[in-house]
Amino acid sequence: MDQTRTRLTRATFRSQRAGKRRYITGFDGLRTLAVLGVIIYHLAPSSMQGGYLGVPIFFLISGYLVTYLLIQEWETHSKRVAFLSFYGRRVKRLYPALVTMILGTTAYITLFQRSLLVNIRGTIVSNLTYLYNWFEINHGQSYFDRFNGESPFTHLWTLSIEGQFYLVWPLVVVGLLLLFRSRVKDAIVLMVGAILSAIAMGLLYDPTNLNRVYYGTDTRMFAILIGAAMAFIWPAYKLRDNISQTHRFMLDGLGLLALAGTIYLFFTMNGQAASTYRGGMFWFTMMSAILVATVAHPGSDMNRILSNKVFSYVGKRSYGIYLYQFPVMIFYEARVHNIGNHPLIHALIEVALIMVVTELSYRFVENPVRHYQYRQLGHDLWRAVSHPLSHRATSVLSVIAVACFALTAVGFVQQPAGGAKPTALQKTITKRQAAAQKQNSAAAKKQRELAKAQAKAKREKHDKAVAFSKMSKKDQKTAKYYFLNAEELTTSKQTPLTAVGDSVLLDDSGDLQEVFPGAVVNGEVGRQASAMPGVISSLSSRGQLAKNVLVNIGTNGNITQDQADQIVHGIGKDHQIFWVTAHVPTREWQHQVNAMIHKTAKKYPNVHVIDWYTTAKDHSSWFVKDNVHPNDYGNRYFTSLIAKTITKQLNQ
């Protein structure tokens, strides 16, 4: 009798538990981990190069929670799902903060940063219709380009994928539940879909244009599908908490290993490496799925480990933190020009600003709207209009909302026609790039002759510098213009050189080829260290890799030890490598890039540092407005430093 009563009690408890939604507090910890990874990556990509992997964790949690709640509703409500109720909850949860962010951001750029109004109509419409990720594929810049005019809306691509998921998923889940009687078969179908998505990511990967695989719904859907598949075979409301000690240890061990692996890859998985898109991100997501599964299990300690007041606070606000991070960062960094000198201080200020804006949104927008009873809307509007003084907070918010809407409308109407007009710097770089490419053909042919001349010059004694008076008038003028003596100019004119780098090199290409007529210049706007091995290999295969190679990379992002090693090995130990340090005070990676360049020079005897940063750091008059690209006067000093350093090394 007692055993029967016990069995009935347990059955009743399971039945009650099946109808009750358990709030998994550890998921707030996972959301905190994910949003911290994303924010640190955006603030300091050189410190956490894999922080963008927080996004697959968000997708995993969404896929798991939404699916298992739909299944639970189906099982406890006589095989029915309230579609309208589901969509209503999603809209109330996500739309108000999104609209607030779009209005506030557009109002700000209309007033203070009108250059960002480019494509603003498409940006607003596609965000409100959750199609922005596809808009970014065709109109946006690379997610990893942190230097060339970032958009404060770029990060919203993830919300569009989530919105598309919410729109179709109740129908998909109900379809699977009706089609298959086995939850395992449902999970297999979803895992097949996840694998196909990961395969599409690998097949569509293009190192010259990551937008398609990075923003695409089809190529990023595998994280959501993996989470959804877990919900069919690992639903939290059906898992027992009274498990054996052995099983508990097993769950905790797997969870801790997955947590450690997740954090490790946050620091090590390069977002531009081919391996990331050809399986790396998929396997990271699978590992993170183990972490999600252990947190969801009531018998594991992982939920408790990832539950505390701080994680709860951040996790509940993770949506707002994610929303407002980019606008705050971009607007702040547009006003502050010495971030590279004090990266930690500025990062803390930016985090504080993000948290303040998020808290205001959470208290005055997200929470009130989520719990608001829309049946009262007409009555509340009438009270606010008829008694404005008794609802001061509401009145103030209403005025702010109207002002933001009006400014957004102005920005919407005043979108620049024909897209963004190139700046003076962009026009200059484009012009000089074309000129450099035209000069490259002649320079490549001249390199063999220069190599012979250089060998002959080395055999001669250099007890005295070549007399300045014996130089041609043209060479005398060139030497004076670039602050060079006769020996420095003569050596430079006889030196075959291949220069590889980014927009700073392109900006200087005309001056460089004036002093080094045998220089082949290969530069690209926005180029990062990850692209260098491919460029070097291409130059080598075309016979354009001279014995002396100038490397100017580091303006647009950090350089890892592996990347530096690949660059040096790709060029080869039989070449002399001259690596220019970066002057980019507006970015936090400046000092880390330069430290890596110096470290690489100590590691390899054929690598020599051209210390542009130290030479230029106190000369703001040498630069254009961005304080990164030299102006015409600065290019004279930039070219001079290169020539002097190369001459000194070659004539030792």
Image (spheres, rainbow, N blue to C red):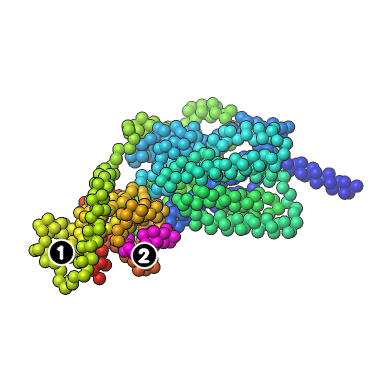
Viewer-nearest residue: 335 or 554 = 554
Image quadrant where residue 547 sits: bottom left
Residue at image location 69% in from the left, 57% down from the top: 250
Instruction: Indicate the position of residue 120 as horizontal and vertical percent values.
Output: 39, 35
User: Which amino acid type corresponds to the residue marked 2 in the rendered image?
Assistant: Lys
Image quadrant where residue 101 sits: top left
Q: Does the stretch in magenta take in 321?
A: no
From the viewer's perspective, tell me whether residue 1 is left or right of residue 322: right
Instruction: Indicate the position of residue 561 as horizontal and vertical percent values.
Output: 43, 61
| Sequence-first disc among 2 and 1 | 1
Viewer-nearest residue: 179 or 135 = 179
Q: Which label lies toward us, 2 or 1?
A: 2
Residue at image location 68% in from the left, 46% down from the top: 234
From the viewer's perspective, tell me whether residue 441 is left or right of residue 313: left
Instruction: Indicate the position of residue 330 as horizontal and vertical percent values.
Output: 39, 46
Residue at image location 68% in from the left, 50% down from the top: 297
Instruction: Indicate the position of residue 290 as horizontal and vertical percent values.
Output: 63, 51
For the C terminus, give its image quadrant: bottom left
Give SS at disc 1: helix
For disc 2, the marked residue is: 573
The span picked out in magenta is 560-580
Up the image or down, 540 lies above or below 393; here it is: below
Gap between marks 2 and 1, in whole Å? Answer: 30 Å
Viewer-nearest residue: 446 or 502 = 446
Is residue 317 visible from the viewing direction of this image? no
User: Which amino acid type corresponds to the residue marked 1 in the rendered image?
Assistant: Ala
From the viewer's perspective, tell me whether residue 101 is left or right of residue 594: right
Residue at image location 56% in from the left, 37% down from the top: 165
Q: Does the stretch in magenta take in 563?
A: yes
Q: Residue 486 got which mark?
A: 1
